[in-house]
Image (cartoon, rainbow, N blue to C red):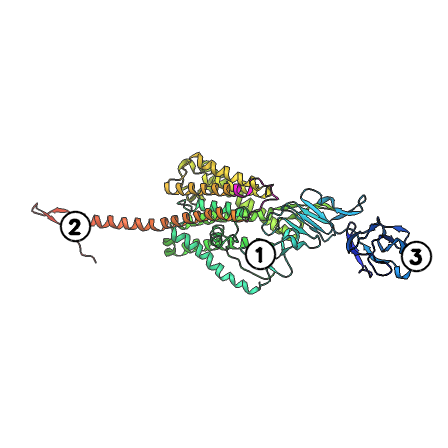
């Protein structure tokens, strides 16, 4: 060391590396004893160390009790003689306060983990914190430390080393903020994914036009193909898509492979989601994405209302849609139910944040910057969620579950309203045997139970998978043939088995032997394979049922025409008695 090093700013516990070699008066290398002194050379700051015949590195620790100070380096001879040629060198050291998330340990005089960050999931190293598991840790505007033990989304890094002054290191897809619920800078959230991008502008609002067309196309598709709950062909597909979409972080990711990107659109459409990644408007946030979930549902409902109104006004429209409009309405209501159930889950979800100063607070899971039931944006959503739950989800579930009993009471005045909606109820009951008319309601109860378990046990994915396996295995092995049509029963059994195999494959291929949820890595090649096969099989079943639904009316029409021509042929050759009592054959009538 032949000159004074640059000034150093260190945290308690940090050390500075100094390369030293001692020279004699003739500039020859001479091993010696080096001391480090404090300011006036009255205090030895550390034990003396001996130099060797070559340059070596020495660790000089910071001394927090002195604050900002000069640390002198010299040999014992230089200290005793203070000759210019042996003038000691010094290092300006400033000891800083412990950084965010660390506190001073009075025994070791070094910065250690804040009490909130102490545990087997955290490894502190002065400036960095290594975190294992799906946890979020960061600084809050108040200057305190916040920790959330569950960050279950695919845009949260599961295992990471972070600096608590940079929250973005815990997030993927250009996200930032508490629980990664916001976008970095002026970026905007995208529909159909968790990605944030800076490429969005208000020009994308023109997408409202294709969205309007898609809503009309959905209604037209259901009307044309008769793909409704009245014949039972779509029920199991809606349930399958709901289970997969609700626990998407367990089952699949569109980033797995190109095939999964296509199949994820199939799952999204059955959940009335867009299914493609796109911008919508500039600076869109989580709160805006939730409001958009209601907008599309309201729009499709308006289309149905318009069709019903047109049927009342136009006799031609009435004849066209007379037999299919009620089943289509019933189908759309079931689709809305699944979508609203997931949306209400988003609204009601909250996370418990432990705070180093204030104790704790509840935050909205999908945007941690908004305090639960405190921030005005969340209060508005919460009220809407309560209204949807109280006036749609609960009544609809009870109605379909208790229909067999309510119909027996419909002659009572208090239950006379049931007769007004009987056509809608009949559509849900039509494909089932009489003893299983409650089946649709039972599946709605299962959806609600799965939503509750998925929301409050998201840190225990093995419990969610176990519940899915048990429920669907119970349905399969119970031997219930709930549908009148054996084709629909076989399709439902196939998809139940499909869900069971997919769930078991994910569990045993990736989860067995791991410490939940810290070693849970859902998006791996092992996950992609069973999920790709599972969704592919369900899509194939959907396509085959669609063909069956399409060609069944054609087959019946051809059969009817053949029977008609057969009757005409018989009439042509049927003998008749003339006035003389002789038989003769009737001549065919001329077509006019």
Residue to which mark 2 is pinned: 572
Quick check: 363 left or right of 555? right
Residue to which mark 1 is pinned: 195
Q: Tell me how many marks there are.
A: 3
Between circles 3 and 1, the one closer to the viewer is: 3
Picture coordinates of residue 389, whole percent (x, y): 56, 45
CA distance for labels 1 and 2: 72 Å
Q: Is residue 519 magenta?
A: yes
Compared with 273, 425 (above or below) is above
Verify CB contact (< 8 Å) between mark 2 and mark 3.
no
Which of the two labelled residues, at mark 3 and mark 1, occupies the earlier sequence position? 3
Q: Disc 3 on helix, strand or loop?
A: helix
Residue range (magenta): 506-523
Residue to which mark 3 is pinned: 81
| Crowd tier of the residue under label 2, counting other residues whose Cα lies within 10 Å: few below 14, some 14–19, many 20 or above | some
Q: Disc 2 on helix, strand or loop?
A: helix
Picture coordinates of residue 8, whole percent (x, y): 79, 57
CA distance for labels 3 and 1: 68 Å
Kindly identify the residue that appears in the image at 58 percent across and 56 percent down.
Answer: 195
CA distance for labels 2 and 3: 139 Å
Kindly identify the residue that appears in the image at 65 percent across and 54 percent down.
Answer: 169
Residue found farthest to the left = 580
Verify CB contact (< 8 Å) between mark 1 and mark 2.
no
| Crowd tier of the residue under label 1, counting other residues whose Cα lies within 10 Å: few below 14, some 14–19, many 20 or above | some
Nearer-the-camera pick, 139 or 531? 531
Picture coordinates of residue 281, whole percent (x, y): 57, 61
């Amino acid at each position: 060391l032949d000159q004074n090093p640059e000034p150093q700013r260190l945290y308690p516990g940090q050390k500075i590396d100094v390369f030293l070699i001692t020279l004699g008066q003739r500039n020859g290398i001479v091993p010696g004893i080096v001391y480090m002194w404090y300011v006036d050379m009255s205090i030895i700051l550390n034990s003396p160390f001996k130099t060797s015949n070559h340059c070596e590195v020495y660790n000089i620790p910071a001394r927090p009790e002195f604050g900002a100070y000069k640390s002198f380096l010299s040999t014992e001879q230089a200290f005793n003689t203070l000759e210019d040629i042996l003038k000691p060198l010094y290092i300006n050291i400033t000891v800083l306060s412990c950084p965010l998330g660390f506190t001073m340990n009075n025994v070791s005089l070094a910065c250690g983990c804040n009490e909130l960050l102490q545990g087997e999931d955290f490894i502190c190293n002065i400036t960095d914190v290594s975190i294992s598991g799906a946890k979020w840790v960061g600084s809050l505007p108040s200057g305190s430390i916040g920790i959330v033990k569950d960050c279950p989304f695919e845009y949260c890094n599961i295992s990471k080393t972070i600096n608590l002054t940079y929250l973005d290191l815990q997030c993927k897809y250009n996200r930032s903020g508490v629980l990664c619920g916001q976008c970095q800078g002026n970026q905007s959230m995208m529909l159909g994914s968790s990605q944030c991008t800076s490429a969005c502008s208000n020009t994308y609002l023109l997408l409202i036009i294709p969205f309007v067309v898609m809503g009309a196309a959905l209604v037209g598709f259901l009307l044309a193909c008769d793909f409704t709950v009245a014949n039972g062909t779509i029920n199991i597909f809606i349930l399958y898509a709901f289970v997969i979409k609700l626990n998407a972080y367990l089952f699949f990711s569109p980033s797995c492979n190109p095939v999964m990107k296509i199949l994820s659109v199939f799952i999204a459409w059955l959940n009335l989601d867009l299914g493609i990644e796109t911008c919508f408007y500039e600076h869109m946030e989580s709160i805006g994405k939730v409001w958009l979930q209601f907008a599309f549902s309201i729009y499709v409902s308006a289309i149905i209302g318009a069709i019903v109104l047109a049927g009342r006004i136009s006799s031609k429209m009435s004849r066209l849609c007379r037999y299919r409009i009620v089943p289509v309405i019933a189908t759309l209501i079931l689709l809305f139910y699944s979508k609203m159930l997931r949306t209400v889950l988003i609204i009601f979800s909250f996370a418990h944040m432990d705070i180093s100063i204030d104790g704790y607070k509840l935050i909205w899971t999908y945007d941690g910057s908004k305090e639960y039931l405190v921030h005005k944006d969340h209060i508005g959503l919460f009220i809407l969620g309560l209204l949807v739950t109280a006036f749609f989800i609960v009544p609809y579930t009870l109605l379909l579950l208790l229909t067999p009993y309510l119909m027996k009471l419909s002659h009572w005045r208090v239950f006379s309203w049931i007769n007004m909606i009987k056509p809608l109820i009949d559509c849900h009951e039509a494909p089932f045997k009489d003893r299983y008319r409650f089946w649709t309601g039972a599946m709605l109860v299962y959806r609600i139970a799965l939503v509750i378990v998925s929301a409050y046990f998201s840190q225990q994915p093995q419990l969610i998978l176990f519940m899915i396996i048990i429920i669907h295995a119970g349905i399969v092995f119970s031997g219930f043939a709930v549908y009148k049509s054996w084709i629909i029963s076989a399709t439902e059994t196939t998809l139940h088995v499909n869900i069971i195999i997919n769930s078991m494959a994910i569990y045993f291929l990736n989860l067995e032997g791991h410490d939940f949820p810290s070693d849970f890595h859902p998006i791996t090649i092992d996950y992609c394979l069973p999920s790709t096969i599972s969704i592919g099989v369900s899509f194939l079943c959907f396509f085959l049922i669609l063909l069956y639904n399409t060609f069944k009316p054609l087959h019946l029409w051809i059969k009817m025409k053949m029977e008609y021509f057969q009757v005409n042929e018989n009439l042509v050759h049927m003998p008749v008695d003339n006035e003389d009592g002789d038989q003769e054959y009737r001549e065919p009538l001329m077509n006019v």
